[in-house]
Amino acid sequence: MHYIKIFLLAFLFFSCQKEVSKKEIKPKDYSSILKEAKEYCQKNTLNQNKFILIDLALHSGLKRFFVYDLKTNKKIKSYMVSHGCGSHMWSWTTSKENAPISNEPDSHCSSIGKYVISSRGVSQWGIKVNYLLIGKDKTNSNAVKRAIVLHSWEKVPSNEVYPEGTPEGWGCPAVSNESMKEIDQLLTTNKSMLMWIIK
C-alpha cells in the first residue's frame, strides 16, 4: 500500500510538472513575418490567399507548421512537423529543442528560408504524396538537389507530444498522414504557395 501511494504521488507530480511547463510556453508574435510574407507573395506573383510558416525554433513536440490566411492575417491551421536529424540518429528525437540547420548536401539537416511549393509528386513515404520545394534563398538554394520535399511520414504524430519530441528525418518537413490529407487538399486548390521555414 505504501508503494502504491508513492507511485501515485510521483505520477501526480510529473503530470503537474508537464502541465506547468506547457503553460509557460507563450504564443509567439509573427506579425512582422506575416507582413513580409504578404509583400513577398505580391512582389513574386505567388499565392496571395494563404501561406505556410514553419518555426523550427519551437520544440518539436509542439505544433509548429502554421497555415495563414493572408486576407485576414489569421492562423487557420496548425500541424506537427519533423526536422532533419543532422549528425544524430535518424528517426530519434535527439535535437527536439535545437533543430540542426544546414544547406549542404548530405547534411541531413533542415534548411531555413523561403520556398515556393511546386509540383505534386509521388512519395515512398506516408500517403505516397509529396510536393517539390524550390528554395529561394541562399540558405536553402540546394533544396532541389537535396531532394527536400513536403511529405507525410508514419512516425510523425498528429497531436502534440511535448515534452517528448517528433522523430527526425533527413531534412524534409514531414507531417503526419492525417495532416497530409488536409494539406494536400489545401495545395491542390492553392497553387504556388509560399512556405517559409524560420528558426
Image (cartoon, grey):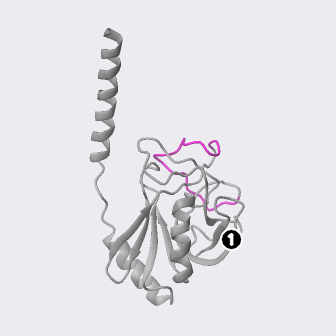
Front-most of residues 162 and 7 = 7
Q: Is residue 9 left or right of residue 105?
A: left
Secondary structure beneath dot 1 equals loop
Residue at the location (62% across, 45% down)? 91
Residue 95 shown in magenta = yes
Residue type, mark 1 in image: Val
Q: Mark 1 points at which residue?
A: 144
Front-most of residues 171 and 121 = 121
Instruction: Please tell me whether residue 78 is drawn above or below residue 3 in the rendered image.
Output: below
Q: Write down the quadrant of residue 11 in the picture.
A: top left
Q: Give the range drawn in magenta.
A: 88-105
Horizontal and vertical percent position of residue 130: 64, 68
Q: Main secondary structure of the magenta part?
A: loop
Q: In this view, does 188 lie to the left or right of 64?
A: right
Front-most of residues 127 and 187 = 127
Q: Write down the quadrant of residue 192 in the picture.
A: bottom right
Residue 177 shown in magenta = no
Residue at the location (48% across, 48% down)? 98
Q: Write down the quadrant of residue 55 in the picture.
A: bottom left
Q: Which residue lies furthest to the front in this view?
A: 1
Horizontal and vertical percent position of residue 99: 51, 51
Front-most of residues 175 and 172 = 175
Label count reads 1
Q: Residue furthest top?
A: 2
Residue at the location (42% across, 56% down)? 63
Where does the N terminus fall, quadrant-wise?
top left
Where does the C terminus fall, quadrant-wise?
bottom left
Horizontal and vertical percent position of residue 15: 32, 33
